[in-house]
Image (cartoon, rainbow, N blue to C red):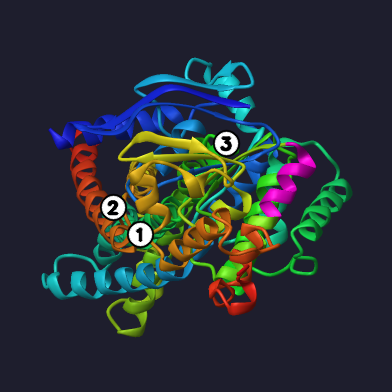
Amino acid sequence: MKLFSSIGAYLLMMKGMFTKPENFKMYWKELMHQSVEIGLGSLGIVAVISVFMGAVSAVQTAYQLTSPILPKETISQIVRDTVILEFAPTLVCIVLAGVVGSKIAGELGNMRVSEQIDALEIMGINTKSYLVAPKILGALITIPLLVILAMVLGIWGGRLAGSLGGILSADTYDRGLLENFVPKNVWFALVKAYTFAFIISSVSSFYGYNVKGGALEIGRASTIAVITSCILILFADYLLAFFIL
Amino acid sequence: MIEIKNVSKSFGDKEILKDISAVMETGKTNLIIGTSGSGKTVLQKCMVGLFEVDSGDIIFDGKDLTTMSEEDRKELRQQIGMLFQGSALFDSMTVEQNVKFPLDMFTKWNHQKKMDRVNDVLERVELKGTNKKRPAEISGGMKKRVGIARAIVLKPKYLFCDEPNSGLDPQTSMVIDKLIHEITKENNMTTVINTHDMNSVMEIGENILYLYQGKKEWEGNNKEIIFNKSARLNEFIFASEFLKDAKDMRMLEEKGIIDNDRNMEDIMRDGGANLVIGEEDRKE
């Protein structure tokens, strides 16, 4: 029963966002602010994770490919496809669910508990569209860009690990990258990125916006937001793979 | 003027407000008093539309909040200023940005005009020069004053204050009370204050509504409250020994046992020490 009322409340929050802005300039300012917070704020962690996930992927693929029949280029093809199809969109978004999701839930939760949301409502501002919508739009703008960056850095990380570790030369790696490339995979990864960006931002906003109580509840809301986002990301990942691939 | 007509509100099975009717007068500081859990905050939140009433009407100068459209409600809210218990300042903004926020959102004024208005209100609440400070860098009393500045920057017709003195020392509380009272008079606003601070009641209680377990128990002003006949209200206001002494003194004064030229508010403002009846204060 609680699940259904939560889903209902979530949908009502989404519906409540679609109203005419009181002042477009202020909404635009907030959207830019959120885009910078979500995008630039997560750039460092995404870059580090991406390079290492590509590097580890190259080393482990080489370790498993023991057959002398398989060419070395296969390593870079496997790294490329796993990074594009799974690691960059899913793994990065799971990490972002923690980084961005907890930040959004914490920020909104704190605003709720300290009556800042009530203060905005009293002024006649639709807080769902002023506070929640820019976060969701900001995430939809920046998270796919972060995923693209993660793809590039992941593949580069594999190249670096391969050449530094003497697994395969940079030329061989590059040659492998160009073989059997399926552009649809990139499109599929972007569909995932947009879906996961929406899940992270909307679910975290929902839990943060509806916090009741004090500081303890803000922490709880952040934790629940991250857990729920991660589960929904994995569930959506399966559904997208099943229906699109 | 705000008229509250037969307002009731429940949360689940729990009835919080029971058929409350009252009038909040323009140009006066209207106080809603009562113990914690008596329904003061719920009543105030119903009045500003943060909670929907179950039954009854809340009428702002002839316009009923409970039946008006969302657009009309938005318009009305721009005539409402509110000071929250914890000030509710935006953490990420400076004092200046906090006060300027309603102007940015609802006016098309140029930057200079906005800044002039911000500086005017900051000067009015005696916070000149604090423009660039963040809420975390200022004291509780200053936060309340920034909250007042933000609430009045759009020159609202109605000002709501939820426990403006909570967490403040008695001296700062009196400064805040005086400020709210003066601003109410200057701008001829309808001010509604939730409080359980007896100093505020005696200082600025021009119209007082006492709630007991969600019901209106008594209505009057600060001159009448000392001699009210409600046992529950007396239990609330004379919970402090100081006020009990004050009441006894007024009784003695009334019966002509003592002759004191100072009025009751002066006596109370001077503090407990002056309530000791010395030989020189006696008539006989």
Q: Which numbered tag is attached to residue A225?
A: 2
Q: Chain of mark 2?
A: A
Residue A91 position in % (x across, y down): 28, 59
Residue A217 position in % (x across, y down): 29, 58
- CB of mark 2 within 8 Å of CB of mark 1? yes
Any magenta on residue B140? Answer: no
Q: Earlier in the sequence, mark 1 or mark 3?
A: 1
Image quadrant assignment for residue B283: bottom right
Residues at discs 2 and 3 both on one chain: yes
- Within 10 Å of disc 1 (Cα), the crowding (few <14, some 14-19, many 20+) is many
**Nearer-the-camera pick, B150 or A185:** B150
Q: Chain of mark 3?
A: A
Residues at discs 2 and 1 both on one chain: yes
Residues at discs 1 and 3 both on one chain: yes
Task: Report the amino acid beneath label 3.
Answer: Ile
Q: Nearer the viewer, mark 1 or mark 3?
A: 3
The magenta segment: B179-188
In the image, is B176 to the left or to the right of B104?
Answer: left
